[in-house]
C-alpha cells in the first residue's frame, strides 16, 4: 500500500514548483552513485532499508547487475519532508563509465542540480571532471557528497585531523574545477562550502552521512565516526545521522526549485524569443501556460511502444492532448502520461511544468526533440553537445541470415534510444557497422541484441579514424555526366577558431542565418562568405560564394547531398572528414530543370570536392584517450611501461604521499586489452580512468598501413584514388 500512497503524494506535490527538485547523481565510475540512490529510494519506502546499498534498485537491466555498472540513466521520484513541508525529488541516476557520457549529457538537460559523488580515497578522477564540466555547461548547480569515508578509517587508518586534511584537499580541488569550468557569473556563487552545508560526507554502503550543520545540531564529531568503526557500531551511526536525511536536506536547501532554475537556465539552453508568450511561460515555469517539453531519453518498449522521457518546462501535459514536434514538423497525440518510480512507470492524468514526465505515443520523437503546444510558434532547444564521439566500430551480422530484417529493426531501435550509437551499412561487404564510444558501449549493444533473441557474430573492435587536409586546392572544375552543368570548387582547412566555435555551439546549422554570419565575421570571415553558409556537418562547412549564378537556389539541396556524401566518407579510406571548408566559387547551370536533376548535380559537386581533398595534402587523424593512472610509487615503473608500450605519451607525473598520478595521452587503437596488462604489471594496484581527448594526426610512418588496412576491410582497392580519378 505504501507505493500507491507514495504515488498520490507525488502527484499532489508536482503542482507546487517551490517544493520540487529535479536532480541527478553524477560521478566517476564506481564511486557509489547507485548505492547512494538506493539509500535515498529506501527512505521513500519503495525498497527496504535492509536491501538498500545492495539491491541497486536503479540498475534494473540484467547487464548492469552482472557488470556492477550503470549503463542507462534511471529515473525515480521521491518524497522528502524538509522544513515541515513535503518535497518531491525527481532523481536521475546516471552512468559513470566514460562510454556512457552521452547518457549523462542527455540527463543534464532535464535537471537543475547535481549531487557529485567522489570516492574519499580516489578523489577527483577524469570522469568526475568530465561530468562536472557537463553539468556546469548545462547550468545544473553542483553540491558535493564525499563517499566511502569508511575507507579512510579501515584502509588508511586516518586520525580525525588526517580525515579533515583529506577532505580539505578534495574540496579545494573540486572548487578549483568549478572556477575553471563555470561561466564567470556563477563561478564564485556556486562554490561548495562545508560551513554552508553544501558538502556532506559519509558511506552510502553503511547508510550514514554527516554535514557540518548536522554535526553541530546533533553534537557529533570526527572522533565519534572513528569510534563507531573501532567498536563496529556503524548501524548506530546510521541511526543517529541517516544518509538519506543529510543528503536530501542538502538537496532541498541548496539546489534550486524549477522556478528559480528556469529563470536562469532557459536563456542559456533555449534559443527562442524570451519576450514571446512561450518564452515568458518557460521563464516563470507556468503550468497554465503553453506546453513546452524537451525529450532527453527514448525507450522502445515491446508492449508500450515508444516512451519519450523529458523535462516539462511550461504548460501541463495530459493524456489525449495533441502537441507539435518542432524538429519533425508534425503533430502527435499523447496516449498516456506517466512518472517514474525506478523501473516502473506509474500512469497519472497530468504532469505540470517543472517536472520530469514519460509520454507514450510519440512515434516520431527522438532525443533532443522539442514538443510545443499546437499553434504556438516554438523554437527547439539548443542542440545537445556531446563531450565525446563514437571512436570504435564493430561489424555485426546475424548467425541466421533469415534474421536480417529483425537485426536491422533492433539496431534502429538501439540507435534511437542512444544517439551516440551510429549504425551504417557497408555497401561493399554488406556488413552492419555499429560505432560507439568504446568497447564497453559496444558490448552493451551486443547484449541488447541477445536480449531481443538474436544471435550475432561480431568482428574485433575497429578504430574509427577521421580524414582531414593540411593544404588548399582552388577552383577544381566538376562537370555533370551530361556535361551541361559545371561547378568550380575550392577546398581548404577550416580555421581552428571556427572549429572551436562549432564545438562550443556558437556556430550551428540550425542557427539564425544573420546571427551565424555575425559570429563568422567576428572570426575573420568576409561578409559574403559568412552570409552564405549552406551546410554544417560535424566540424565541416559548405559555403556558396558564387555570385549571380542562375538556378543556384534550386540545386542547393543536391549540392548539400554531395557535400554530405563526401564528409561522411572521405576519399582516402571512406572515414568521416573533419575541419574541412568547401566553397563553391562559381557555376554554370542548364536552364532546363530536366538537365539539372540530382543524378547530374550530385556527382558534379561531389567529384571536385573529392579531387580537391586529394590535392590538398590529405592526412589521417586518430582518436586519443586522456588517461589518468593512480598507482603506489613502487608500481609506477610498471604503469609507465604499459603506457609507453602502447604508443602512449606521458603528459605529467605528480605525487600525493605514496601515490603516483600519471596523466597520459593514449591512442584508442592501442587501448584494447589495457585493463588486463595494467592489472598484471601493477599487481592490480592501479586505479585508472580514461575519457575521449581529441583527434590528432596519425604518425606519418603508420598512415600508409592504416589506409591500406581500412580499404582492405571495406572491400576497396588497396591503393587510395588519385585526384585525376575524379577529374575526368
Image (tube, rainbow, N blue to C red):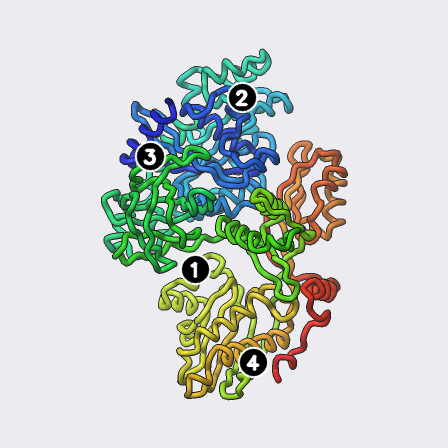
Give how far apart the Cα atoms at labels 4 and 2 are: 67 Å
Q: Which numbered disc, 1 or 3, marks the residue closer to the eye? A: 3
For residue 474, the mark is 4
Q: Determine the secondary structure under disc 4.
A: strand
Mark 2 or 1, nearer chain start: 2
For residue 20, the mark is 3
Q: Which numbered disc, 4 or 2, marks the residue closer to the eye? A: 2
Give how far apart the Cα atoms at labels 3 and 2 are: 28 Å
Give how far apart the Cα atoms at labels 1 and 4 are: 28 Å
Mark 2 neighbour density, 10 Å: few (under 14) some (14–19) many (20 or more): many
Mark 4 or 2, nearer chain start: 2
- Is residue 677 depicted above or below 514 in this figure? above
* Circle 2 residue: 206
Mark 3 neighbour density, 10 Å: few (under 14) some (14–19) many (20 or more): many
Tell which of 519 and 415 is nearer to you: 415
Residue 245 seen anywhere in this rendered image of the structure: no
Mark 1 or 3, nearer chain start: 3
Q: How many marks?
A: 4
Report which quarter residue 140 is drawn in.
top left
* Circle 1 residue: 506
Report which quarter residue 551 is drawn in.
bottom left
Residues under numbered marks 1 and 3 in contact, where contact means CB atoms less than 8 Å apart = no
Residue at the location (31% across, 52% down)?
323
Amino acid at each position: 500500500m505504501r507505493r500507491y500512497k507514495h504515488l498520490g503524494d507525488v502527484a499532489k506535490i508536482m503542482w507546487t514548483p517551490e517544493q520540487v527538485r529535479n536532480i541527478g547523481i553524477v560521478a566517476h565510475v564506481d564511486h557509489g552513485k547507485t548505492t547512494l540512490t538506493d539509500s535515498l529510494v529506501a527512505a521513500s519506502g519503495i525498497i527496504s532499508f535492509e536491501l538498500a546499498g545492495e539491491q541497486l534498485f536503479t540498475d534494473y537491466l540484467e547487464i548492469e547487475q552482472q557488470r556492477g555498472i550503470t549503463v542507462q540513466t534511471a529515473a525515480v521520484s521521491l518524497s522528502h519532508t524538509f522544513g515541515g513541508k513535503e518535497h518531491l525529488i525527481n532523481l536521475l541516476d546516471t552512468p559513470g563509465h566514460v562510454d556512457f557520457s552521452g547518457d549523462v549529457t542527455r540527463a543534464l538537460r532535464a535537471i537543475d542540480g547535481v549531487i557529485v559523488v567522489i570516492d574519499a580515497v580516489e578523489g577527483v578522477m577524469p570522469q568526475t571532471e568530465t561530468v562536472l564540466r557537463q553539468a556546469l555547461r548545462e547550468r545544473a548547480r553542483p553540491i558535493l557528497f564525499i563517499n566511502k569515508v569508511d575507507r579512510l578509517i579501515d584502509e588508511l587508518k586516518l586520525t580525525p585531523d588526517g580525515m579533515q586534511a583529506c577532505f580539505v584537499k578534495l574540496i579545494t580541488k573540486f572548487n578549483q574545477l568549478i572556477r575553471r569550468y563555470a561561466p564567470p557569473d556563477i563561478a564564485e556563487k556556486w562554490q561548495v562550502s562545508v560551513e554552508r552545508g553544501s558538502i556532506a560526507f559519509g558511506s552510502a554502503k553503511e547508510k550514514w552521512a554527516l554535514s557540518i550543520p548536522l554535526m553541530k545540531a546533533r553534537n557529533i564529531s570526527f572522533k565519534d565516526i572513528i569510534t563507531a568503526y573501532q567498536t563496529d557500531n556503524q548501524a548506530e551511526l546510521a541511526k543517529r545521522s541517516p544518509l538519506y536525511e543529510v543528503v536530501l536536506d542538502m538537496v532541498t536547501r541548496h539546489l534550486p526549485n524549477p522556478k528559480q532554475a528556469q529563470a536562469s537556465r532557459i536563456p542559456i539552453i533555449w534559443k527562442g524569443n524570451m519576450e514571446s508568450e512561450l518564452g515568458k511561460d518557460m521563464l516563470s515555469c507556468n503550468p497554465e501556460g503553453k506546453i513546452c517539453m524537451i525529450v532527453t531519453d527514448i525507450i522502445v518498449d515491446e508492449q508500450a511502444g515508444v516512451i519519450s522521457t523529458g523535462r516539462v518546462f511550461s504548460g501541463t501535459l495530459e493524456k489525449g492532448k495533441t502537441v507539435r514536434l518542432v524538429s519533425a514538423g508534425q503533430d502527435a497525440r499523447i496516449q498516456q502520461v506517466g512518472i517514474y518510480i525506478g523501473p516502473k512507470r506509474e500512469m497519472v492524468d497530468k504532469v505540470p511544468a517543472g517536472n520530469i514526465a514519460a509520454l507514450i505515443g510519440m512515434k516520431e520523437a527522438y532525443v533532443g526533440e522539442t514538443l510545443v503546444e499546437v499553434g504556438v510558434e516554438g523554437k527547439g532547444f539548443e542542440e545537445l553537445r556531446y563531450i565525446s564521439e563514437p571512436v570504435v566500430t564493430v561489424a555485426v551480422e546475424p548467425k541466421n541470415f533469415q534474421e536480417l530484417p529483425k537485426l536491422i529493426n533492433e539496431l534502429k531501435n538501439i540507435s534511437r534510444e542512444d544517439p551516440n550509437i551510429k549504425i551504417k551499412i557497408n555497401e561493399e561487404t554488406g556488413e552492419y557497422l555499429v560505432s560507439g564510444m568504446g568497447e564497453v558501449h559496444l558490448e552493451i549493444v551486443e547484449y541488447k541484441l541477445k536480449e531481443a533473441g538474436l544471435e550475432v557474430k561480431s568482428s574485433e573492435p575497429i578504430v574509427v579514424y577521421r580524414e582531414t587536409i593540411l593544404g588548399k586546392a582552388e577552383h577544381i572544375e566538376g562537370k555533370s555526366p551530361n556535361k551541361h552543368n559545371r561547378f568550380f570548387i575550392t577546398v581548404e582547412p577550416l580555421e581552428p577558431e571556427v572549429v572551436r566555435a562549432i564545438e562550443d555551439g556558437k556556430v550551428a546549422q540550425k542557427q539564425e542565418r544573420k546571427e551565424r554570419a555575425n559570429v563568422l565575421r567576428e572570426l575573420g570571415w568576409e561578409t559574403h562568405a559568412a552570409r552564405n553558409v549552406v551546410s554544417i556537418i560535424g566540424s565541416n562547412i559548405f559555403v556558396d560564394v558564387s555570385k549571380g549564378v542562375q538556378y543556384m537556389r534550386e540545386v542547393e539541396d543536391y549540392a548539400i547531398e554531395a557535400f554530405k556524401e563526401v564528409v561522411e566518407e572521405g576519399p582516402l579510406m571512406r572515414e568521416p572528414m573533419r575541419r574541412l571548408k568547401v566553397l563553391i566559387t562559381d557555376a554554370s547551370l542548364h536552364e532546363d530543370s530536366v538537365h539539372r536533376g540530382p543524378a547530374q548535380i550530385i556527382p558534379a559537386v561531389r567529384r571536385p570536392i573529392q579531387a580537391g581533398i586529394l590535392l590538398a595534402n590529405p592526412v589521417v587523424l586518430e582518436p586519443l584517450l586522456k588517461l589518468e593512472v593512480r598507482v603506489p610509487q613502487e608500481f609506477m615503473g610498471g604503469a609507465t611501461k604499459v603506457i609507453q608500450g602502447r604508443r602512449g605519451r606521458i603528459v605529467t607525473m605528480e605525487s600525493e604521499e605514496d601515490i603516483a598520478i600519471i596523466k597520459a595521452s593514449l591512442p584508442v587503437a592501442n587501448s584494447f586489452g589495457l585493463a588486463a596488462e595494467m592489472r598484471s604489471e601493477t599487481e592490480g594496484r592501479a586505479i585508472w580512468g580514461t575519457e575521449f581527448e581529441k583527434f590528432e594526426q596519425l604518425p606519418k610512418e603508420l598512415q600508409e598501413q592504416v589506409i591500406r588496412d581500412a580499404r582492405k576491410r571495406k572491400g576497396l582497392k588497396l591503393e587510395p584514388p588519385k585526384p585525376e580519378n575524379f577529374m575526368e
